[in-house]
Image (cartoon, helix red, strand yellow):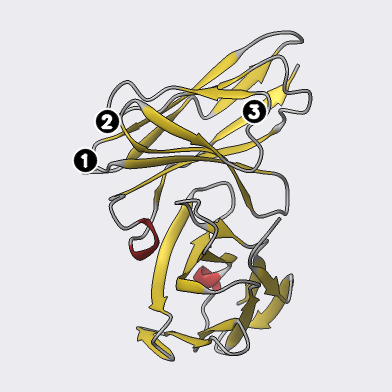
Amino acid sequence: SQQGEEDPQALSIQEGENATMNCSYKTSINNLQWYRQNSGRGLVHLILIRSNEREKHSGRLRVTLDTSKKSSSLLITASRAADTASYFCATDPYTGRRALTFGSGTRLQVQP
Amino acid sequence: DGGITQSPKYLFRKEGQNVTLSCEQNLNHDAMYWYRQDPGQGLRLIYYSQIVNDFQKGDIAEGYSVSREKKESFPLTVTSAQKNPTAFYLCASSIGRDYSNQPQHFGDGTRLSIL
């Protein structure tokens, strides 16, 4: 079963607007990661946030983590057409399995 | 440049045939992973390996097999027992010692279809 579930499933915005994607998960975690996937390509790691962190920034990306609500959000500011991609969260649930669990993703379309 | 190479990019399987997808990395990573991605869906873990000569089943291992004889290589065989193999297959690697605290590096995938 998917540990992380992204919301919304799809998002369409105009260039220059901000895009916010959310990820909810079910069990306690150590860290949460966000990845980006361009169509037909592999995933690219964007950012990792630890369970004792509440917010992290990287360029135009801002990630928040609320462990009490078991949720995270990814904000892309001043979006560009090149940001068009699918975005996935990945968690490391306490299951004894030494592998990440990926969500189903948010497909972001940025209109020029 | 260090990275992960998956081959072939496109693969076609005939009824009753086994096919093998190649994954090679030159990042000196201990851990390697295979994922299956169906259209518009997330990634589902097939197999993973934390060290040479050892591997573990993921969520959807039935109909698949792997080997890890070398650190750099983690081939995936899609057997005839996998009745619905059409999907995008992604290989990834990570440093491995602290899997949750390290990013995964991905190849560009193999798209498998049934003839």
Q: Position of A82 compared to B51: left or right?
A: right
Residue nearer the viewer, B14 or A84: B14
Badge 1 marks a residue whose secondary structure is: loop
- Local packing at callout 1 (Cα closer than 10 Å; few below 14, some 14-19, many 20+) is few
The residue labelled by disc 1 is B28
Question: Which of the chains bears the disc numbered 2?
Answer: B
The residue drawn where x is 39% and y is 62% is: B100
Badge 3 marks a residue whose secondary structure is: strand
Q: Position of A14 compared to B75: left or right?
A: right
* Residue B112 numbered mark, or none: 3
Answer above or below: position of B15 versus B103. above
Q: Position of residue B55 (x, y in %)?
A: 44, 32
Q: Distance between the residues labelled 2 and 1?
A: 7 Å
Q: Position of B31 compared to A92: left or right?
A: left
Q: Would you identify the image quadrant in which residue B32 lies?
A: top left
Whether the residues at callouts 2 and 1 have beta carbons within 8 Å, the answer is yes
Badge 2 marks a residue whose secondary structure is: loop
The residue labelled by disc 2 is B71
Question: Tag 1: residue type?
Answer: Asn
The residue drawn where x is 39% and y is 78% is: A50
Same chain letter for marks 3 and 1: yes
Instruction: Please state, as top left, top right, bottom left or bottom right, where the N terminus of chain B lies in the image.
Output: top left
Whether the residues at callouts 3 and 1 have beta carbons within 8 Å, the answer is no
Residue nearer the viewer, B96 or B35: B96
Question: Tag 2: residue type?
Answer: Lys
Q: Where is residue A78 in the image (x, y as percent from the top left)?
A: 50, 88
